[in-house]
Amino acid sequence: MGLESGVAAQALFGRPSTRAETAPIPEAHERIFHQGPGQHGGEPTPLNKVYVIHEGKKTQIKDPRLPIQFKHGDHFIIMSGGGAGVGKPSERDPEEVLADVKNELVSVQMAKDVYKVIIEPAKMQILEKETLALRKAQG
């Protein structure tokens, strides 16, 4: 199961049980509703997301502060948005963005949309002229 764009971590929880249980999802809710601020032009924290998987169907939980009915074989996923940014993303060194793409921390699309770095996916190379033009156009 791959991470969604902007997701810092994903945890899948489940435990064997022969009975249905009701339980709140711990510690996941604070960043579902509130973003931490970025610093020096950085982006705020992405919001966390919580899902329950029941019989193979993934359903997003809108308010995990409320008790959730779990059935035998159910799992829940907490997708952590990670931390806030420091500095303007469009001023990040393109080589560092490329390294993040190669390490699968950032997608090619996210490199373009957030960091304003255009990467040729087949060769995993920065398109310098296009990147410069995109950054210049964004101001």
Image (cartoon, helix red, strand yellow):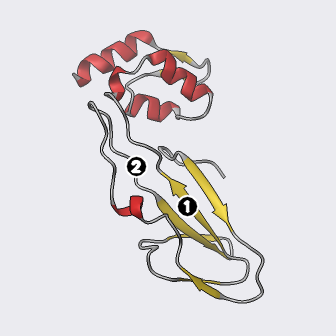
Front in this rendered view, residue 10 or 30: 30
Q: Residue at image x 53%, y 69%?
A: 26
Say what secondary structure mark 2 lies in. Answer: loop
Where residue 131 appears, x then y in whole percent?
A: 38, 17
Q: Residue at image x 56%, y 35%?
A: 105
What residue would you read off at disc 1? 78
Where residue 129 appears, x then y in whole percent?
A: 39, 10
Q: Residue furthest bottom?
A: 19
Q: Amino acid at mark 1?
A: Ile
| Quarter of the figure with residue 17 | bottom right
Where residue 75 appears, x then y in whole percent?
A: 66, 71
Q: Are marks 2 and 1 in contact (CB under 8 Å)?
A: no
Q: Residue furthest left?
A: 139
Q: What's the mark number on residue 46?
A: 2
Front in this rendered view, residue 106 or 26: 26
Q: Amino acid at mark 2?
A: Pro
Whichever of labels 2 and 1 marks the residue nearer the N terminus, that label is 2
